[in-house]
Image: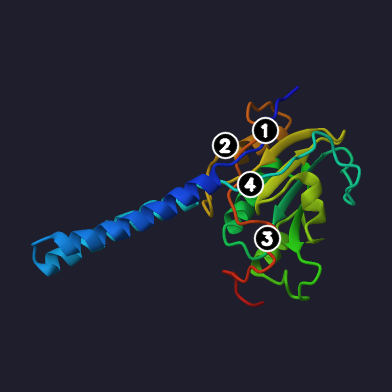
Amino acid sequence: MPKFGLSSSKGDAKEAFAADLARRLLLLSDAIIARSKLPIRTLISFCWLLTVGGGFIVLLNYQESAGGTGFTPMTWPSASALRLARGQDTLIMFAHPKCPCSQASLEELNRALAKTAGKVSVRVLFFKPAQGSNDWTNTTLYRTAASISGVTALEDIDGQEAGRFGANTSGYVVLYKPSGDLLFKGGITAGRGHAGDNAGESALVALILGQDSAIRQTAVYGCSLFNKRCTTDTTTPP
């Protein structure tokens, strides 16, 4: 029986560290300028390099900060309005329609499906507030998911299904056997918005193909799934 560890994330700690580092670098730059006897142009150049380097560290920490997860049931939740597929595994990805990080998650999903040749039933559920406008999910991200062969894109009103499956972060994936037993949970990218080979996508492909995998749980990288005020959309109008 595969073992699934407790879902946890160090994302909040990393982001707090990055913010504190940026603040300290700015204070350090001010102190250097105030106390140094070097020419002002030299000081400005030095402090600029210091700030750019600090900004890079902050960005790197953000990209590597995993999102939070809730409790994912070991067996298919009976309260779900979704139904298990017959004779093949069922995969669900939960996404925020305006999360720029999730474009990479969809790219990895597309790659995984290309390798598994229709052996899995796939749905991508997009969070939508109950009071959201009619075009809340009218984004390129939603249309991209709907255009992937074998994928059904659906709206998840107020994230009801996401709550049943423990999804708190956009890009979270669950895979269940036809019997309803959980096979995999987590993300399928190596970082926020980072497409490319990664342990999650490799494990997902292996499990769909009926192969064994030592990895059954991975960190998920993306925006908060339940952000009702999100206006960011890297997409273009239809």
Circle 3: residue type: His
Which of disc 3 and disc 4 is earlier in sequence? 4
**Alpha carbon of mark 4 to alpha carbon of mark 1: how far?**
12 Å
**Alpha carbon of mark 2 to alpha carbon of mark 1: how far?**
18 Å
Image quarter of the N terminus? top right
Q: How crowded is mark 3: few (under 14 residues within 10 Å), some or many (20 or more)?
A: many
* Rendered image: mark on residue 68: 4
Secondary element under disc 2, as helix, strand or loop, is helix
Which of disc 1 and disc 2 is earlier in sequence? 1
Residue 124 in percent (x, y) is at 74, 55
Against 92, residue 179 (above or below) is above
Residue nearest the viewer, comparing 35 with 180: 35
Do the CB atoms of the residues marked 3 and 2 lie less than 8 Å apart?
no
Residue nearest the viewer, comparing 210 with 105: 105
Q: How is the image coloured?
A: rainbow
Q: Mark 3 points at which residue?
A: 96
What residue sits 67% from the left and 62% below the top?
A: 227
The mark lying in front, picked from 4 and 3, is 4
Q: Can residue 171 be seen in this view?
A: yes
Circle 4: residue type: Gly
What residue sits 76% from the left and 76% below the top?
A: 133
Circle 2: residue type: Ala
Image quarter of the C terminus? bottom right
Do the CB atoms of the residues marked 2 and 4 lie less than 8 Å apart?
no
* Rendered image: mark on residue 199: 2
Which of disc 1 and disc 3 is earlier in sequence? 1
Total marks in image: 4
Q: Mark 1 points at which residue?
A: 6
